[in-house]
């Protein structure tokens, strides 16, 4: 899969994944105690619902995604919410990205649906940019979603 698929998907006016923060991101990141810098990366953040929410909590957030269309929507959303000065966009692949700022105090990866071996590479790469003793947070689909759950992929992508 390449960025053209995602650019086409995000080319619609409405937000594909809503503007509402993921409930797990809000639950797990809402009360983080961080003194000093409050820098965060969201990897494969798409339209930026989580990144904008983090910015509204006072984080300086970089959304890394390989769809420029998604990132354009993210930056417009950040402006709409009054947090544009806290939001940056980085158009890059999850396996090869170089963040604009590193290390960060928080890294979020939510629902990146790629084969397991590639997911491990992306997660390790992201973790390498987290300051020692700080936070790496992930949200994943359950394999149960394939047969009776909500959302997520309709075919098994991981082995």
Image (spheres, grey):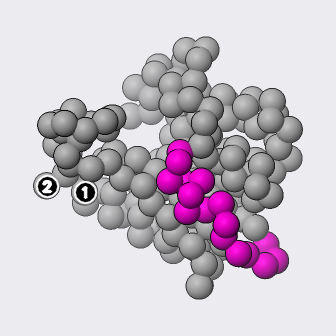
Secondary structure under the numbered disc 1 in the rendered image: helix
**Image position of 88 with respect to 59: above or below:** above
Is residue 29 magenta-colored? yes
Seen at 50% across and 64% down, the residue is: 137
Secondary structure under the numbered disc 2 in the rendered image: loop
> Which image quadrant is residue 157 in?
top left
**Image position of 54 with respect to 40: above or below:** above
| Residue at image mark 2 | 159
> Which image quadrant is residue 40 in?
bottom right
Residue at far top of view: 13
Is residue 130 magenta-colored? no
| Residue at image mark 1 | 116
Residue 52 shows in the view: yes
59 relative to 92 in the view: left or right: right
The spot of residue 92 in percent (x, y) is: 54, 47
Q: Which residues are magenta?
A: 22-37
Seen at 67% across and 66% down, the residue is: 31
Seen at 51% across and 25% down, the residue is: 16
Q: Earlier in the sequence, mark 2 or mark 1?
A: 1
The spot of residue 108 in percent (x, y) is: 54, 58
Instruction: Point out which mark residue 62 bears.
Output: none
Seen at 46% across and 22% down, the residue is: 9
Residue 68 shows in the view: no
97 relative to 75 in the view: left or right: left
For label 1, the crowd category at 10 Å Cα-Cα, with few meaning under 14, some 14 to 19 and many 20 or more, is few
Asked if the residue under mark 1 is in contact with the one under mark 2, i.e. CB atoms within 8 Å, the reply is yes
The spot of residue 105 in percent (x, y) is: 66, 72
The residue nearer to you, when weighing 122 against 133, is: 133
């Amino acid at each position: 899969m390449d960025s053209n698929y995602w650019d086409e998907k995000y080319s619609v006016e409405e937000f594909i994944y809503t503007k509402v923060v993921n409930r797990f991101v809000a639950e797990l990141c809402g009360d983080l105690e961080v003194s000093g810098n409050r820098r965060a990366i969201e990897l494969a953040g798409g339209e930026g619902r989580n990144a904008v929410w983090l910015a509204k909590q006072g984080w300086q957030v970089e959304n890394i995604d390989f769809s420029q269309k998604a990132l354009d929507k993210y930056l417009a959303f950040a402006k709409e919410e009054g947090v544009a000065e806290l939001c940056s966009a980085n158009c890059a692949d999850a396996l090869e990205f170089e963040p604009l700022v590193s290390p960060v105090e928080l890294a979020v990866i939510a629902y990146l649906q790629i084969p397991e071996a590639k997911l491990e590479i992306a997660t390790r790469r992201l973790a390498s940019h987290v300051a020692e003793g700080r936070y790496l947070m992930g949200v994943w689909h359950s394999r149960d979603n394939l047969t009776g759950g909500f959302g997520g992929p309709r075919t098994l992508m991981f082995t």
